[in-house]
Image (cartoon, helix red, strand yellow):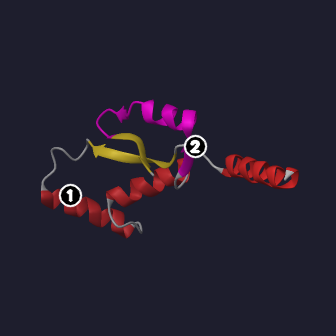
Amino acid sequence: MNTKLKHLLFILAVGIAFSSCQKCETCTVVVKDFLWDDGLTQSQLDDLNATYQLLGYNDAQDYYDQLFTGAYGAGEEYCDDDLDVIKDEDDITVPGSYTVGWECVE
């Protein structure tokens, strides 16, 4: 009987040790809003995107996505307190250019 109790306690301890209560999400820095394109016509935007395509990108969004992915990583996993810090950060606006911030998914 003593052996069964030990096995039961061992199984319970292993179950608790390997269970996770962490809240984790994968977060990436992304451009949330372009400010420089507010006054441009659709024709001008098309010309601008054509320029980015000549550089090897799909469009301006693709260029900036790759720029920030290179600088901040393609998506890092953040958990618990670290995730709270990321989610509490304010977006950053570069005047006349764009607004960037964290985007997180579970």
- Disc 2, SS: loop
Mark 1, residue position: 45
Q: Percent x, y for residue 52?
A: 35, 63
User: Is 103 placed left or right of 83 in the picture?
Assistant: left
Mark 2, residue position: 21
Q: Quadrant of residue 53?
A: bottom left
Q: Residue 36 in magenta?
A: no
**Residue type, label 1:** Leu
Q: Percent x, y for residue 28?
A: 47, 49
Q: Residue at x 26, y 59 (%)?
A: 48
Numbered label attached to residue 37: none
Q: Earlier in the sequence, mark 2 or mark 1?
A: 2
Q: Quadrant of residue 101?
A: top left
Q: Nearer the viewer, residue 66 or 46?
A: 66
User: Is 32 placed left or right of 42 in the picture?
Assistant: right
Q: Residue at x 20, y 63 (%)?
A: 46
Q: Percent x, y for residue 23?
A: 52, 43
Q: Residue at x 42, y 55 (%)?
A: 65
Is the residue 19 above or below the residue 53 in the image? above
Q: Percent x, y for residue 15?
A: 69, 52
- Marks 2 and 1 sit apart, C-alpha to C-alpha, by 47 Å
Q: Residue at x 55, y 37 (%)?
A: 80
**Residue type, label 2:** Cys
Is the residue 69 above or below the residue 57 in the image? above
Which residues fall within the magenta stretch?
76-98
Q: Nearer the viewer, mark 2 or mark 1?
A: 2
